[in-house]
Image (tube, rainbow, N blue to C red):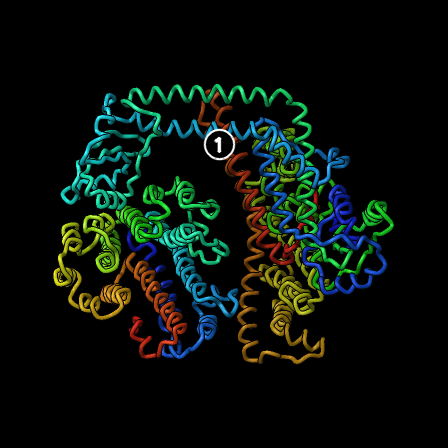
Amino acid sequence: MNSPYDTYHAVKTKITTKKGRIFKKLNWEKILDFSTVDQLTDYLKKSEAFEDILKDVKNDIHRGNLESVLGRYKISEIENLLHYHSGAYKEFLKTLLTEADLTDIGLILRKIARNMSLYDMEDRFIHSEKYTDIPYDKLLSSRNVGQFIENLRGTPYYNDLRGLTNEDAIKRDFHIEMKLYVTYYKSLLEKADKLNKENKKTAKDIIGTRIDILNVLWIYRAKNYYRITPAEMLNYSLEGGKEINFEKLKKLCFAENEEEFDEIVGTSLGEKFKDDLNNIDISLAMNYFMYNYLNQNNFENFGLTLSYIYMLDIIINNLTTITEGIKYHLPKDNLKSYLVYEL
Amino acid sequence: MAIEKMALLKIVGSLQEMETIIKELILYENISIDTESDHYGNNYLIHQYETEIVGSTECRILDYDELESECKEALLSLESICKDLGIKLALDKDLIKNNDLSYEKAIELLNQYKTSKGKAAEEIKLKKEKIKELLYYKERVDGAFDKSLDLDKIADLKYFDYEIGILSNEDRIKLKKNYENLTAIVIRIGIVKAPVENLYLIIYPKQYKEETVNFLKSLSWKRFVLPEKYKGTPQQISEQIDNDVKALEDEIKELTGTLSSNDVEAKVLMNKIYNALKLEEKIVSIAKHADFGENIFLLDVWTKKKDINDLKDTITKISDNIIVSSEKVYDGAKPPTVLKNNWFFRPFELIVKMYGLPAYRELDPTPFMALTYCLAFGIMFGDLGQGFIYFMAGYLLSKKIDLAGQLLMRLGASSMIFGLVYGSLFGLEKHQLPWLPTLFEGGPLSAENIPKILVMGISYGIIALSGSFVYGIINSLKNGDKEEGLFGKNGIFGYLFFLSFIFTIITLVGLIKIPLFVPLIFLIVFLTIIVLKEPLANALDKKELFPHGAGAYFTESIFESIETILSTLSNTVSFVRVGAFALNHAGLFLAFMVISELMDNIILKILVLTLGNVLILVLEGLIVFIQGLRLQFYEMFSKYFIGEGVEFKSIKLN
């Protein structure tokens, strides 16, 4: 893709097939009728898209496990897309793969902080074994948070977590997530800078949109659930948003009340998102926003690849929500209201 | 010139003697474990033997996974001790054979050593770590801008607290953007380069402690606290650390001295322990594949047929309680492959293995491949002088990498023989060197010789492909695949189709004078048979003709037949390259010859010709090597060779 449309047509064909396999063929009505996770697993096993990744999975799969398997599916899809991209585009996608490292690092760290067994952790990992630079064996051998962080030395995330104590890892759980995100998105935006002009803009727009909603979500959670000062909120926020720049971010963090907060969200990300934020589950609101954003833009460039990957996220979210719904015996119509249903 | 015959042995013995038996098997170095053994059948046998073999009933089956990890752990700790002591560990077969040290004793000795002498080693390690820690402090203290800064003066403020810590560059920017939200004095007091760390002093009112600390946490602040004993200005602290490091280094030197005094003794002991542990590790890894009864074990091993008696003697010598029986190879067993070729063909196994190892029941393609490959290389790169250079290069290489060198020697020799056929010495031909013998008067590039050489290439192709067909047919029939072996496109009728295809071409160009329809009729008949391969094979076996429906079968089969026609054509034409490269070889040199003729100076002439030869040797030689490989792998192997064999990996210590 060094000249923008070199392999664009190949990518487009590939993605159209992939999209067809996953978006059109999943019958959500039918999925919602399932009453056990096994039924869902069986259904997915028979679908063209998930067949390969699920074929070795036994029945009576644990819910968390299905979540990991679906997470790995996304990673394997990105790995597959790497073959159709080269140069800066490939590097960008490789960085995108490292998002799974954040999940896995957080997973191990939380268990270690709580002194929980690390048995069978490998089964829950979703990161790309081929492209990861994280020394997982070493991390798994850590006996406490201090050792864990020492074992991270040499990776981009060491700096984010150093100084973290065992107590912090439990009481300031968000620190792990947000700090790792800061580094991840920073490096993703750096990789976007290397793309050609048109694709750079698209990539930065998509990533920027993602950053916007993550920031809103973060500040919303921080204000409602954590006892931290606005200045701290600001420090944990991500830079590089599309609509919400640093000044707006600052205003969001320092907003005195809900109205002020809503006002800023409404003017920057639209009234619908603001309403969703107040009326439905916040992560669903976020998924809807991303879904609408991706759907409105008919990408004819690298955005096509990115939009496919982020759409996958939404599908996987839907499926994990359904497994949760099945577990808590939620009625179908109720469960429906937790899904991005237009897919 | 084939694949070595293998035998499956079942070794049954009492649990008590298992370790001894496995040790003997390891030292024998010529068996491999059958990891896919038939456990169901083995259970039956175990029942049968249980009463025949008398063993101590006290012997228990151990948890071999646990034993293995225990063994690995012991090895790791032994290795780390020996690394600190500077002792080199090595496997020693004689030592293993006569080692009187049991595994349990080895572990005991190791633990003893760890508690006595190991203490010193442990102390050295701790001191080294301490030095590392001190140097970490020193680096940061040395990074202070103001070497005379004295923090003791602000230590006892009544209303203020202070903290020193480290921030990365990014967090530093965040801090700057957020200054107005922090009730504290922020001073940057130093910097450490690579990776950049900024040293900050933060002074804040005591009442804002929690708020400030939390704010700093959100910046991944890492507190920097020196050990209590270091006090004063950075200059003074740096000196104090230097002194402590020096003292530690002296202590380490002294400790190393006490350890090395009984160097030789320790070395012998450590190596004894090491070998005992290594042996146990291997034994355990093999025991994991055994099947167990109450007090006996059963192990399936592969060995060469010719070694059976020797192996039986070796094992049964241990005690009367051991049964070694050669078994019929069960269905679905995958006997490992050992290639057995004579001195001439052996180097070519390298090339065959690049593609895949022949399965046990497959024909070994090495001899055929060696002959055809040498021939192709000779035809494409025939030159007495250049061949000799390859031969000598191969000879030198064989001292470093035996087989690769031997391979090059054979290719060089083949090139030399064809050099005599073409009459070419370092590219020079008969009209430059009249004494050179040649079969092609006027050189390969003269007008009447070009067609001859191209035809030679094709003829080579027809012979090589015929050989491949024969191999393919034998392999298919050996595996009982009648459909492919008789009627398939690489089977007997496939070959007949190929021959009639050649005759059609020969008739077309008018080389033989028969009416064109004669070979054409054969061509069509044979193609029809290939199209009907599945029903024909089913008819032979008296099965249903079209088990998956006739419509689908014919659609697929007709497309396949089109592919057969195209691939037969392209397979054959592909061999034109053999002739073409022979011409190319002469042509490339001709270019350098012309350049040299433009030169007046004899030295320049020689220089140009030498350069030409070097280029041909390096570049064209490589291309011809690859093109030859391509013909083997793509046109020939695909017809007859699958290469899904399992390598015979004899168990031994390494």
Q: Residue at x 45, y 54 (%)?
A: A116
Query: Residue B206: x, y in percent?
Result: 20, 39
Q: Position of residue A304 (x, y in %)?
A: 30, 60
Point out the residue furthest to the front here.
B158
**Image: B398 above or below A92:** above
Q: Residue at x 20, y 68 (%)?
A: A278
Name which residue lies at 53% across and 75% down. Answer: B555
Q: Residue at x 18, y 66 (%)?
A: A274
Percent from the top left, x then y, of residue B447? 55, 43
**Image vertical order of residue B416 relative to residue B21, above or below:** above
Front-most of residues A160 and B323: A160
Query: Between A279 and B571, which is closer to the camera in this rendering?
Result: A279
B570 versus B310 height, above or below: below
> Toward the viewer: A38 or B544?
A38
Q: Secondary structure at mark 1?
A: helix
Q: Which residue is mark 1?
A: B592
Q: How many marks?
A: 1
Residue A66 sits in quarter: bottom left
Q: Position of residue A111 (x, y in %)?
A: 42, 53
Could you tell me if residue B337 is visible in this image? no
- Residue furthest to the right: B320
